[in-house]
Amino acid sequence: MPATETRRRPARTAGGDDFAALGVDRAIASRLARDGITTPRPIQVDTVAAALDGRDVCGRAPTGSGKTLAFALPAVHVAPGQGRPVVAILAPTRELALQITEVVRPLGDMRGLRTWALIGGTNIKRDIAALKAGVDIVIGCPGRMVDLVQRTALKLGDVRLAVLDEADRMADMGFIPDVTRLLDATRCADGQLLLFSATLDDPTATLEARDSHDPVRVDVGAAPTASGDVSHTWYTLDRPDRREVVQSILADHRSAIVFCRTKRGADRLATQLTRNGCDAAAIHGDRSQNQRQRALAAFTEGRTRVLVATDIAARGIHVDDVDVVVHYDLPAAPEDYVHRSGRTGRAGADGAVVALVCRDSEADGKALARKVGVDVTWARHGGGRPTPVTERPQPAAQRQHTGGPRGSRGGTAAPSGGRRGGRGRRPRRNG
């Protein structure tokens, strides 16, 4: 970080395990404490102090590990600009960008920083007006940001801190050319880059090598196993039986996210479930931004029990108190299974994950099960409820007792795929 860079923050205190001890402004630390956030999580301990000291950071951390606050805190300690952004935070999906904004905006307000979200599906004229009025922190998706740069409405030349959240997901979605174009427009060549990803694969490593300078590398590969048990049950069944089975699973849980492979499939399943008395809402890329936000709000507040989603929601939705995740269609890759499954078992709660494996693709399903790195209980469906069957366990070396991103010590699923009854119906919290 250049010597001319200034940060309005207190000196770090010696010892202690609270946020003020990491160098966080005491007023912000007090605000976090009022919200029940008193002890930094591992990813926050290892990154916040380094970032506040001006270091670049490259962190690997699963969803639900607390990384949003890990980069939000350094972001709100940057000195305000002169009407142009000084911080840019990039995220792969609209939902994730909005949820980051919900974390950053109140903290930024305490520091006199103006925050604005730049996402597709909204009125771009409002974005242009906000940028003209003056914004300090911009949070958004690469596509909308590039559009605004090309219109000369968004000027990134004053950005001293850039954050890439879910960098691997942005690579999967083809955003890397836009990301590099945006980074080239900032001052981050002599400023700061905080790069967070669930995996450190080739595209992420390329970004790190290209844009980071002697970064602090942090690897929180999995959340602590003591945080909650997540059971993983995989059913083998005939394809026409999937709807019957998913309805029996949903009857045993208060809240669920069901993943489908296609947008049409998500719409069709949500409609079928609702007709059968299980209120469900679909969320995918063809829904308008308002539709997506309404569906997510209804689910978060407990007015809708089931969210039927495509993979757009695997990393872009952070909601606590989801009882069960159902893979109605198997994901294409092990990492997709991990990210989908990470919607349950968050914030120390128990959870259940169910995958439906059609008999016509059972070989592919078993191959995927060997790769996902969790203990799987198999069950067969032959009419009525599925019944557990004994499968040869994976070799210990191939297992990670992490239950997806939130941590499982294996767990044993009930015949219906999870805990009976679930928790009481109450609003769920955005994480």
Image (cartoon, helix red, strand yellow):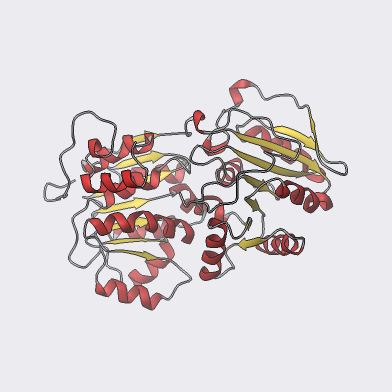
| Residue 211 visible in this rendered orientation of the protein | no
Q: Residue furthest right?
A: 383
Give x and y (percent) for residue 175. Answer: 45, 57
Q: Nearer the viewer, residue 91 or 411?
A: 411
* Residue drawn where x is 11% and y is 51% of the image: 4
Q: Nearer the viewer, residue 259 or 384?
A: 384
Give x and y (percent) for residue 376. Answer: 68, 32
| Residue 357 visible in this rendered orientation of the protein | yes
Q: Is residue 396 left or right of residue 380?
A: left
The mark total stands at 0
Figure check: 40 above or below 111 = above
Report which quarter residue 279 is drawn in: bottom right
Q: Is residue 16 left or right of residue 372?
A: left
Q: Is residue 236 left or right of residue 143?
A: right
Q: Nearer the viewer, residue 403 or 183?
A: 403
Q: Residue furthest left?
A: 4
Say which quadrant the N terminus sits in: top left
Figure check: 234 above or below 111 = above
Report which quarter residue 87 is drawn in: bottom left
Give x and y (percent) for residue 35. Answer: 36, 47
* Residue drawn where x is 36% and y is 35% of the image: 218
* Residue drawn where x is 16% and y is 43% of the image: 10
Figure check: 265 above or below 378 = below
Give x and y (percent) for residue 252. Answer: 71, 45
Q: Is residue 235 left or right of residue 46?
A: right
